[in-house]
């Protein structure tokens, strides 16, 4: 079912060559690999910023091992002050599993003083997210107590049985869905998971009717990029302007997202 995605990923990658470092306050962002984490791609502000950086673990569409398949999106997130660890080396070949995401989580825990190349990480602010097959990988990692935030992009668990087994266990996490509307092949999966979340889970679901490929190939990942920035900027950095995108201002709706949410008032994140 998800194999069609290989095409989508290839497309996103082709266009992403135009990426110019993102538009956030910590631009330009760049990507690299750490010698101690060779099978991942790390996105961060080019120069060590005056802020601690929360961490986002990312799984690519098709579970691809190309850590630059979502270059536009992940560079944009890093330019807003997030340290992103994508599964797969830059232009890596083959595919990944959620074990690769977990390697990133273990790796940050071993950094001396939580510092990488002069950048101080906020190890109490770790999120996990992914697109399509990468979103399914993210479900495998959200259960870890070091991770508090789940972002599901054009994805959802594959079968009803899986959904019923996994999703009711997500109490205590914050869970956001970014889906591509009815023409997204993962639409029904994401919708089902959202309805199965335990009562009280702070959660949001948006559908932008562009299909499974989202807008990741657009400059700075387009409208999915805008929403993803607000997602990390609010839930990991505590940025109130970004909270408004989902809550009081509902700029998401104004931007064309069909939205639903539950218990967002319970989200309190101290600004970094
Ligand atoms: C930190 O750096 C960012 C990006 O250059 C800037 O927007 C912000 O005002 C700085 N904050 C402080 C407290 O210096
Ligand atoms: C990286 O991936 C290669 C190919 O799958 C593997 O042989 C190697 O052991 C991996 N390295 C680490 C540090 O995980
Ligand atoms: C909130 O995020 C926006 C976009 O990254 C940034 O311009 C603004 O300075 C942030 N606000 C605070 C209080 O950090």
Image: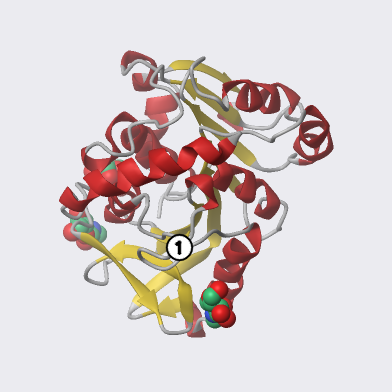
Residue 231, quarter of picture: top left
> In the rendered view, would you say 13 is above or below 66?
above
> In the rendered view, would you say 257 is above or below 41?
above
Q: Position of residue 92 (x, y in %)?
A: 42, 65
At a point 35% along the width and 46% down the height, the residue shown is 10
Q: Nearer the viewer, residue 237 or 42?
A: 42
Residue 162, quarter of picture: top right
**In the figure, is residue 211 to the left or right of 107?**
left
Q: Does the rendering let one see residue 110?
A: no
At a point 69% along the width and 28% down the height, the residue shown is 193
Colouring used for the render? secondary structure
> In the rendered view, would you say 248 is above or below 133?
above
| Number of other residues with Cα within 10 Å of mark 1, as a class: few under 14, some 14 to 19, many 20 or more | many
Quarter of the N terminus within the rendering:
top right
Quarter of the C terminus within the rendering:
bottom left
Q: Nearer the viewer, residue 44 or 14?
A: 14
Quarter containing ligand 3? Answer: top left
**In the figure, is residue 93 to the left or right of 219?**
right
Q: Which residue is mark 1?
A: 85
Q: Nearer the viewer, residue 181 or 53?
A: 181
Q: Position of residue 219 (x, y in %)?
A: 21, 39
Callout 1: SS: strand
Q: Position of residue 87 (x, y in %)?
A: 49, 61
Q: Nearer the viewer, residue 165 or 159?
A: 159
């Amino acid at each position: 079912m998800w194999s069609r995605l290989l095409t989508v990923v290839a497309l996103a990658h082709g266009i992403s060559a135009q990426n110019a470092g993102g538009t956030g306050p910590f631009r330009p962002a760049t990507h690299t690999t750490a010698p101690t984490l060779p099978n991942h791609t790390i996105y961060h502000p080019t120069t060590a910023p005056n802020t601690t950086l929360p961490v986002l673990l990312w799984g690519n569409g098709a579970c691809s091992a190309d850590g630059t398949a979502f270059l536009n999106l992940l560079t944009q997130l890093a330019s807003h002050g997030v340290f992103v660890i994508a599964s797969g080396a830059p232009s890596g070949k083959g595919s990944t599993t959620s074990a690769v995401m977990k390697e990133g989580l273990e790796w940050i825990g071993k950094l001396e003083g939580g510092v990488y190349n002069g950048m101080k990480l906020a190890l109490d602010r770790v999120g996990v997210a992914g697109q399509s097959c990468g979103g399914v990988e993210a479900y495998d990692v959200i259960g870890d107590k070091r991770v508090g935030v789940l972002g599901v992009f054009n994805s959802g668990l594959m079968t009803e049985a899986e959904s019923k087994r996994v999703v009711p266990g997500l109490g205590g996490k914050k869970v956001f869905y970014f889906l591509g509307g009815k023409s997204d092949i993962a639409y029904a999966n994401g919708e089902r998971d959202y309805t199965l979340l335990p009562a009280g889970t702070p959660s949001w679901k948006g559908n932008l009717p562009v299909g499974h490929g989202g807008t990741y190939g657009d400059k700075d990942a387009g409208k999915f990029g805008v929403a993803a920035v607000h997602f990390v900027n609010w839930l990991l950095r505590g940025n109130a302007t970004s909270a408004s995108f989902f809550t009081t201002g509902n700029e998401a709706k104004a931007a064309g997202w069909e939205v639903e949410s539950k218990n967002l008032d319970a989200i309190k994140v101290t600004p970094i």
